[in-house]
Image: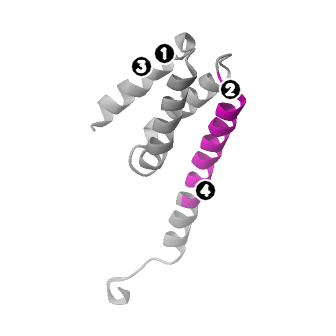
Amino acid sequence: MNLTVFSSLLQTILSLIPQITSSATINQIVATLINLIPVAVQEAQDLVPLIRNIIAALSNSSSVTPDQVAALKALDAEIDASYDAALAAYLTARKNPQTPAAQ
């Protein structure tokens, strides 16, 4: 999926959250975010703020159940952990750059 389409999809989801009252629809959004976060962190970091906005908007929705709030908090923590892991890998690579002879 191209980045523009992906971004538009996330913006649409975010704009529709105030009208979402169905627990099943919220579950679908949470499930979709679970699948999108690893891709967004690795491939399209510009989209992570949109995902965070969706998580925040859903978390503040009166239609969200306590289980869904817990899932959203876990997603937010997953984003943080993914960033921490990516940063650690980057810093490790900078401290120990491989030379062509070492490969």
Residue in the image at 59% along x and 30% along y: 55
| Mark 4: few/some/many CA within 10 Å (<14, 14-19, 20+) | few
Residue 73, given in percent of the width and then of the height, sits at: 67, 39
Which label sits in the foreground, 1 or 4?
Answer: 1
User: Looking at the image, do the residues carrying marks 3 and 1 touch, with CB atoms under 8 Å apart?
Assistant: yes
The relative height of residue 17 versus residue 5 in the rendered view (above or below) is above
Q: Which mark is residue 65?
A: 2
Q: How many marks?
A: 4
Sequence order check, earlier mark of 2 and 3: 3
Instruction: Please name the residue that numbered disc 3 is placed on.
Output: 12
- Type of amino acid at the residue the image marks with label 1: Ser
Q: Could you tell me how far apart the alpha carbons at marks 2 and 1 are, in whole angstroms? A: 20 Å
User: Looking at the image, do the residues carrying marks 2 and 3 touch, with CB atoms under 8 Å apart?
Assistant: no
- Type of amino acid at the residue the image marks with label 2: Thr
Residue, far left: 2
Instruction: Please name the residue that numbered disc 4 is placed on.
Output: 84
The relative height of residue 59 versus residue 78 in the rendered view (above or below) is above
Residue 71, given in percent of the width and then of the height, sits at: 63, 39
| Mark 1: few/some/many CA within 10 Å (<14, 14-19, 20+) | few
Instruction: Please name the residue that numbered disc 1 is placed on.
Output: 15
